[in-house]
Amino acid sequence: MSAPNDDLKDDDHVFSVLAWPTEEIRNNRKRMGAICQWCNKTDQGLGRPLRRCSKCEAASYCSKECQTRDWPAHKKICGQPGIAKLVKTLLSNPIRRSPIPSTYALK
């Protein structure tokens, strides 16, 4: 049986092999279009820019109605520093966007 630290080393190795290069994540973040936080419509699909939350500028919405519907959830994080960059970073990494296989999630 392996020691707990050995398991962590194995996990670190797997992550480093699977991790996308930082530069590629930065490029994806720059290229990313806006996605409505409520209905997932994109600026590209609508052919126009989405509205941004005027307070944090992290959340995007295709309409005032979507913004109003999302407000109960959004107000909990609105205005927190770094949220906009964190959201773009998470969404620009294909590994983080894809579902995690249950075998890894249960490990």
Image (tube, rainbow, N blue to C red):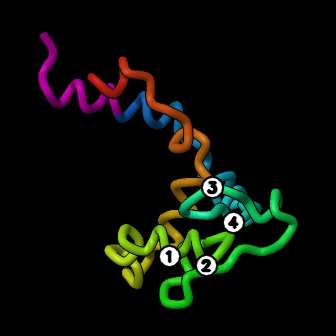
- Mark 4, Cα crowd under 10 Å, few <14 / some 14-19 / many 20+, is many
From the viewer's side, name the closer residue of 74 and 57. 74
Label 4 residue SS: loop
| x then y, percent, for residue 75 | 37, 77
Q: Residue at 47% of width from left, 37% of height from top?
A: 16
User: In the image, what residue occupies the spot 68% across and 52% down?
Assistant: 24
Residues at circles 4 and 2 in contact by the CB criterion of under 8 Å: no
Choose mark 3 or mark 1, whichever is in front: 1
Q: Nearer the viewer, residue 34 or 66?
A: 66
Q: Which residues are magenta?
A: 1-11
Please tell me which of labels 3 and 4 falls first in the chain. Answer: 4
The C terminus lies in which quarter of the figure? top left
Q: Position of residue 36 (x, y in %)?
A: 62, 64
> Which tag, 3 or 2, sits closer to the chain's start?
3
Residue depth check, mark 3 versus mark 2: number of the one nearer the observer: 2
Q: Are marks 1 and 2 in contact (CB under 8 Å)?
A: yes
Q: Residue at x 41, y 72 (%)?
A: 74
Q: In front of the other: label 1 or label 4? A: 1
> Which kind of residue does numbered mark 4 sit on?
Ala
Q: Nearer the viewer, mark 4 or mark 2?
A: 2
Residue 98 appears at what percent x and percent y?
55, 36
Which element is circle 3 on?
loop
Question: Which mark is nearer the camera, 3 or 4?
Answer: 3
Residue receiving disc 3: 40
Q: CA distance from mark 4 to mark 2?
A: 15 Å
Residue matched to label 2: 64
The numbered dot on residue 44 is none
